[in-house]
Image (spheres, helix red, strand yellow):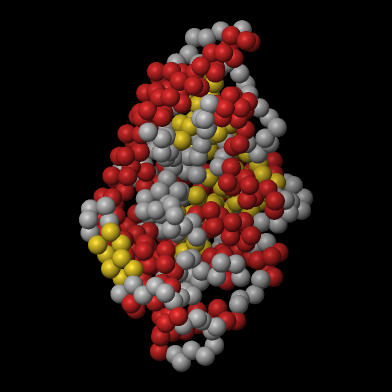
Amino acid sequence: MAAINYSAFFSKTAKARKESPLRQLWEDAGEDIGSYINLAGGMPHEDTFPIKTMCLKLTDGTVLEMDKETTSEALQYGRTPGHFELLRWLTKLLKIVHNPPTLQDKSHPGQLDMLMTNGAQDGMYKILETLVDEGDIVFVESPTYPGFLAAALPHGCQLVPIETDENGLIPEEFSRALKDHSTNSGKKMKFLYCVPNGGNPTGICYTEDRKRLIYGLAREYDLLILEDDAYFFLESKPYTKSFLSLDTDGRVIRLDTFSKTISAGIRTGLLSGPKPIVEKAILAMQTSSQNCSGVSQAILLAVLQHMGHDGFFAHCEKVAEYYRRKRDLCVNFAEKHLKGLAEWNVPSGGMFLWIRVKVTNDSCSIVTEKLRNRKVLMVPGISFKINSTIPSAHIRVAYSYASEEQMDKAFRALAEELRTLATKVGTPQD
């Protein structure tokens, strides 16, 4: 397989973007920055900050204290790629969990590199800026995460939906779309976007065999893969191999987040992938947020170092078990209230139940009007479609947050509205 020509994937913006001279001084100094007499950066002095130390109390009662030096570093501007120690910890995590083929090979043109982001959504946005021009072709699951649609559509790219089943993206559908669009004159096929675990909104988990088939098609048509794996640690062990773990070429860009396992509010994510692409994403961050929040990185590092890698895995198992119990409650209430009115598959992980109602092919008014008037919030299926003018009979239910009593009440309300609609239109119920 020939080496990937990464420059062919870069957007005009990415090709035109230059490094920030002030930021680059910092990057060039590396971990030795403390030994320099720094008269270059316009850094506010830590003595003027009202915060001197930070202290965290964990759920098990453990107290983690950050001394003045650690706190001062956290409160200051940081290097764009991320905190050195945190990246080292996460590099080991990636090696343990995924063991990417491009991690150890220093000579690989797509050698793995990493960037701390302000959540996975920030990483997604940086990749869109880096890779997408108007008219470019991007393949997406159908249905797909609306946050990606909202970020991608303003770039003017052509989003091509690919149908999914219980095992992930359907390879035959993907192959047909790749063949059809590979002949489009003047349009570049850039990447496939997918949520391979606990799919948002479907809850499906790609099988390893399915991933291998999809990766093979990406190789055949020289396509990149954007693997948005926010729900990876919410799956049961043993974890299914990731696209990153199969990536011998250096064509997979992976988005991870700590929003589901440590905290959503600290807004920390990890973008990992081929060094040429990550370097362009770093340049994009240099001119936007400059770096992931130093305080957030310090909090995350303190918690992860306290846990250790084994402790982190144990914590994730507890988190996964918590959401499995919530899932089971949700499915039980669906069985209790919606039998004959709707159908669904039990998700393997994630936070969502994807319901198809039987009494109508358009769930929108039920969700946005009837249920909202009853103080119940769900998401209509059209929110997950590229073309939101096409009706959808689906509804996404998030079971992650509501209490048992609230779920019972919400499903009862949905069932009542569906029965009322069925009576009006004369739809038979099972």
Residue 24 placement (x, y as % from top left): 55, 80
Left or right: where does residue 14 sit relative to residue 313?
right
Direction left: furthest residue: 61
Residue at point 68% right, 48% down?
153
Residue at point 22% right, 56% down?
61
Image-quadrant location for residue 224:
bottom right
Please tell me which residue lies in front, 248 or 323.
323
Please tell me which residue lies in front, 132 or 288.
288
Residue at point 46% right, 35% down?
398
Residue 207 visible? The answer is no
Please tell me which residue lies in front, 191 or 216.
191
- Image quadrant occupied by the N terminus: bottom right
Q: Is residue 278 above or below residue 241?
A: below
Residue at point 39% right, 53% down?
263
Image-quadrant location for residue 131:
bottom right
Residue 304 visible? The answer is yes
Direction right: furthest residue: 185
